[in-house]
Amino acid sequence: MASPILMPALSPTMEEGTLARWVKKEGDVVKPGEVIAEIETDKATMEMEAVEEGVLGRILVTEGTDHVAVNTPIAVLLEEGEDASAADGLDLGPKAGPASKVEKNVPAQTPAPQAPASTSTTDLVEPEWGETAEITVREALRDAMAAEMRRDEDVFLLGEEVAQYQGAYKVSQGLLDEFGEKRVMDMPITEHGFTGMAVGAALSGVKPIVEFMTMNFSLQAVDHIINSAAKTRYMSGGQMSCPIVFRGPNGAAARVGAQHSQCFGSWYAHIPGLKVVAPWSAADAKGLLRAAIRDPNPVVVLENEILYGRKFPCPVDEDFILPIGKAKIEREGKDVTLVAFSIMVGVALEAAELLAEQGIEAEVINLRTLRPLDTETIIRSVKKTSRIVSVEEGWPVAGIGSEICTVAVEQAFDWLDAPPARVCGLDIPLPYAANLEKLALPKPEWIVEAVRKQFGD
Amino acid sequence: MGSMTDAPSRQNGPALSQEEMERAYREMLLVRRFEEKAGQLYGMGLIGGFCHLYIGQEAVVAGIGLAMKKGDRSITSYRDHGQMLVAGMTARGVMAELTGRSGGYSHGKGGSMHMFSKEQEFYGGHGIVGAQVAIGTGLALTSAYKKDGAVSIVYFGEGASNQGQVYESFNLAALHRLPCLYVIENNRYGMGTSIERSSASKDLSKNAAPWGIPSRKVDGMDVAAVYQAAREAMEHCRSGKGPFLLEMETYRYRGHSMSDPAKYRQRSEVDEMRRTRDPIEALKAEMIKHGIDESFFKAVEQDVKATVKDAAEFAETSPEPDASELWTDVLVGE
């Protein structure tokens, strides 16, 4: 049966082109894959191949014609033995594009699609866990991994120096002895490779915990964290899941210079498909890491080297766990809301003490989770205090503080008595010199100053 | 172990059985006709974005497919339609993903380069060159961890073979003796750059030698040679000896993607390959020598044509995904 040959689209953006040259003449036999014409797009001259076998019956668009729209019939293909007149009955008007073939699901004018309402974080109830004991953040993290590895055979730890060395920062101390080298795997210094490998393992049925010696080195593997781990569930239409934890110390340590001192909170919180937690206390560390390991999604756990050795009370209940996505009010107050995460929670609490001496009662929110952000807790607090200051160690531009201030303006504008303010690390690579490093990172006095400004001082 | 880089001689092993030849022929023809149709639908604007056709390389997936066992996993690059069809994914589901419709494997949210099938143990479809090599090594880590006896087939091109993570993966797989079959599909061109102009290593089958990974260079246009090499390599992997590397010397007839101006190679080179080295024609000639009748080829041609036509119709009429699909599958449990 005679069929029209249509002007093809030869690139993702092509809408029309020039029919530069006919390589085949009327009456020529063509086979699939044979070049029949040359088409000029805005980018290149490209060869057009025949798709079906047949005879080039009639040329409808002569060579040299410009602005030939995609899907315009340019020739007629006859079956072998068919007469050129077989083309006479064909509809050779311009063919409609694919749009006509199905009912479009997008109306012509449409408002931006709204995300479905997320479940209220007030439903995430934190039970009373009872008795506590003082432990370090380091011990809390180790205990969390050990508890989850005992609970689930599919959970294992891999990273540089996690096994025989017992962890570059001693976080994995004792795990090799208890679980053996199958489940506590030392990795060569190849973050890109072993992170990709861990993602593949997670996609196919096990639950790796990837320790980065510091989160700075996760940059070597960032493609796998974002493109491979975070997006595969979506790109597979929900078939694949990637239960994996990426953890390690984040932010400034002490005088290790710019490449080893930066906060990745904003980087990873930006990515749909990831969850991001940033514990401060030992209880945060234990509860959130256990939740991260159990979560069926990729979770980034941003720890802090300086906090590793600090002691905090932590519930001793062996079932203790915290919900991801729920912030904690560490100190109640009525005059201003301070929002912080990780090591800055302690700094914010110190600032709250100083403010209290000046008669200002600050409420301190420990975010615990950066994605999904517990905006409910933030907004509830702002509606009470009418002032908000975010505190983070990371850089100001497009930081977590930018997000928090935006949320406050968007959702509590009418309650605000002062513009939201950010306290951040200085917008520079972190210097080495002891005095300069100290000058570059937020301290309680900066927060006090930001709050006083909101009171018009 | 040591390197075994000699091309395997066909005389040393059994040729394909009649059943295997018939299966290989059917699968290769399905891939060929499917891709021709995909090219046509692209030209009509029904398929958008990037679309990388497999035409010319069919013997690689068909031969390896014959050697695979149930439960074996596979993963590849963005040139993935052939792997998916041979893995047992339906032509309908793949084509509808190409057209971005709800009937596609990813409900239209993945496209040509991002398709997966849990059921067929196919792990993508990856758009980042070389990423699948590290991820694929992880599929094999799962096998080692769970002792499930599966082999993971990790396909990548000669272009990807220059990526650093490929060598990081070789090191990890060799260290942990992972059941991983690496398959370099050397089709001579990484986009428009020929291997001579991109790789100082001229014999890619030797690229894993420093890690003690045995390897073989294979005529990737000969499905029987591919099958034989893959079978031996997979036995090696399955028996706990660790990874294996096969370099398939193959050729793609079409451009890198649909928008390839084809200025980096002579048309005569493509024509010559098609005329003298076509894997489907070669197998057909072999089958005719074995007395397989013309009626078989006619029947398969008709059958395949019907499957592809049905897939195209399904892909054109399956509705676009509902707007609510925007928000689903971002996270598990939401």
Image (spheres, coloured by chain):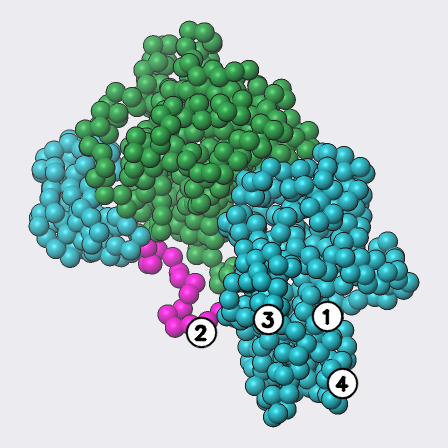
Chain colours: A cyan, B green
- Which numbered disc, 3 or 2, marks the residue that appears first in the sequence? 2
- Image depth: mark 1 or mark 2 in front: 1
Which residue is denoted by mark 4 in the rendering? A356
- Report how far apart the C-alphas of labels 4 and 1 lie in the structure: 15 Å
Amino acid at pointer 1 = Gly
Residues at discs 2 and 4 in contact (Cβ within 8 Å): no
Q: Nearer the viewer, residue A454 or A77?
A: A454
Which residue is denoted by mark 1 in the rendering? A346
Element assignment for label 1: helix
- Report how far apart the C-alphas of labels 1 and 3 lie in the structure: 18 Å
Q: Is disc 2 on the same chain as disc 3?
A: yes
Element assignment for label 4: helix
Amino acid at pointer 2 = Pro
Which residue is denoted by mark 3 in the rendering? A439
Residue A44 in the image: state x and y as whole percent.
20, 48
The chain carrying label 1 is A
Which residue is denoted by mark 2 in the rendering? A111
Residues at discs 4 and 1 in contact (Cβ within 8 Å): no
- Report how far apart the C-alphas of labels 3 and 4 lie in the structure: 24 Å
